[in-house]
Image (cartoon, rainbow, N blue to C red):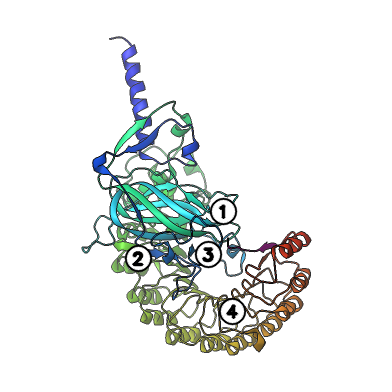
Amino acid sequence: MSPVFPMLTVLTMFYYMCLRRRARTATRGEIMNSHRTVESNSRTSPLNAEVVQYAKEVVDFSSHYGSENSMSYTMWNLAGVPNVFPSSGDFTQTAVFRTYGTWWDQCPSAPVPFKRTPANFQSQDYVELAFEQQVYPTAVHVLETYHPGAVIRILACSANPYSPGPLADVRWETLWSEKPTKVNASQARQFKPCIKQINFPTNLIRLEINSSLLDYYTELDAVVLHGTKDKPMLSLKTSLIDMNDLEEDDYEEKDDCEMDHLNKKFSSTALREGPSNGYFDKLPYELIQLILNHLTLPDLCRLAQTCKLLNQHCCDPLQYIHLNLQPYWAKLNDTSLEFLQARCTLVQWLNLSWTGNRGFISIAGFSRFLKVCGSELVRLELSCSHFLNETCLEIISEMCPNLQDLNLSSCDKLPPQAFSHITKLCGLKRLVLYRTKVEQTALLSILNFCSDLQHLSLGSCVMIEDYDVTASMIGAKCKKLRTLDLWRCKNITENGIAELASGCPLLEELDLGWCPTLQSSTGCFARLARQLPNLQKLFLTANRSVCDTDIEELACNCTRLRQLDILGTRMVSPASLRKLLESCKDLSLLDVSFCSQIDNRAVLELSASFPKVFIKKSFTQ
């Protein structure tokens, strides 16, 4: 046989592998403008016509700017046909997340980030949308009407949210992902990423968001799902092969499979006779531990397979003092927790945010894990963990006696009676109850027993009947409080503010945004300024009564101020803002959107005089 034929065979196999890889992965970046070689194009026959549909409903989300009792700026605006597009600007009929930029990360209330978070996991928020029909996706279009560029990941789920039967074999597949990128325009656009083909039909789409590079709040109007009822046939169109594609595996594919094999890789039977330890056994144990501290959880899984010595190090509980499982929310289940259990006996920080939904984690599985691993816990993040029920909070209160930091943000399925168990956690210093159903009786009991609280978030807690009574209890019991979030509390008055100001003199951050019952004429804002000189962040968003007197009081008394939001006021002039900017040398964020006396010319003049301050002025087209 001629030597040419083996060479041809090798080249053919190499070529085939390239095609397979390009057919199953979505590209990074703007593939439509790329010269890369292999494209996967779906061709549909007339018998398999494309279905185009808008979202039927919003089934879950992590946060939104709006209220739980209205439609303005809420995620629910993503359901149905566009309300605003193609217009650009700040419109109440769109979906808006709670934060943007890095401002919230710079606040006193910002938690310390978890180490060992994979570099490719940068999602901050999410929203899940259900569609009428299950289809094989061929395109997903996102209609962005203001400050686009926040969407960094799109996923599809095999579960049908409208199926009456129990969910079985639920899995998520990434259709497209990209690192956060800066979009140098605030105008509306139709975002049309090139998605990869999946082998199951879906009517549940998830958008993940990173707003850290945005200059202002992103606004989304609608999401369009294109797809076919039958699985489309791939047509592979080839040209020159980009060798860069062969040098680096797709991040999403690697991390998705890691949690699938987590149980095997950490199993005691997974490591068989392998290579020698090389020179590692000559290094001090502590030095190897220090080196391994820089690895992510999937990297530890891989390294544990190399030799017995490194397996011992990778399974050492000291490697799991801080454990962030949020990046693996799509795969983490009871079995994963069971095999991690023996290695997490010393865990102090645990992040289970976004995990366990749709039956992935059971009450029994969570309880078993905490009974073994909860005794040393100091920090527990459970944002959007909808598997939680009253039993779970009872287990937390019993098994985590040292807990100081508890985040239940957007756990809106927890029943009101569940929160009474938090009273047993007397050492709490940080408690986040944003968008939960906590009621006033349980909250007052928590405040009475948890007097060491330093950070408290009660934003959008709509079942608290009287915020004045709550504020009075906070002022009486929480003398160490440094940050307080009362975003959209519906009925706090000047009486509650007076109790807060006199009882919590250490406050550095106070969010009173969208609190309509506060009136400047009562002197409540001036009182805040005089009694809280340590304020670094003050949000008085959408309070139309804020006036020049209030701004001048802040300028005189709160010289440490860094962030101020007075969006929507009609009674503040450029002159008072200039006094504020001259007095507060550390001020870096000032939002004067929809302030009728502060026009664009005034913003430009103030920006020129104080170039270190980001002055925000939103607009409606």
Q: Residue 11: x and y, percent?
A: 36, 21
Task: State which quarter of the image contains the C terminus.
Answer: bottom right
Q: Is residue 210 visible?
A: no
Question: Main SS of the magenta segment?
Answer: loop
**Disc marking residue 91:** 3
- Specify which label sits upstream in the sequence, 4 or 3: 3
Give percent across and percent down for residue 274.
Answer: 36, 39
C-beta proximity under 8 Å, tags 2 and 4 = no
Q: Nearer the viewer, residue 181 or 430?
A: 181
Query: Where is residue 463 drawn, in percent x and y?
Result: 43, 82
* Distance (Cα) linking label 3 and label 2: 45 Å
Numbered disc in front, either 3 or 2: 3
Q: Residues within 10 Å of mark 1 (few under 14, many from 20)?
A: some
CA gap, disc 1 and disc 3: 13 Å
- Of badges 4 and 3, nearer the viewer stands 3
Measured in 3D between alpha carbons, the distance from the residue under mark 4 to the one under mark 1, in whole angstroms, is 41 Å
Horizontal arrangement in the rendering, residue 93 relative to residue 273 (left or right): right
Task: Give the mark nearest the N terminus, 2 or 4.
Answer: 2
- Numbered label attached to residue 546: none
Which circle marks residue 481 in the picture? Answer: 4
Q: Earlier along the polypeptide chain: callout 2 or callout 1? A: 1
Q: Badge 2 is on which residue?
A: 369
Q: Secondary structure at mark 4?
A: loop
Q: Nearer the viewer, residue 257 or 183?
A: 183
Task: Verify CB contact (< 8 Å) between mark 4 and mark 3.
Answer: no
The residue at which mark 1 appears reads as 187
Q: Secondary structure under badge 2?
A: helix
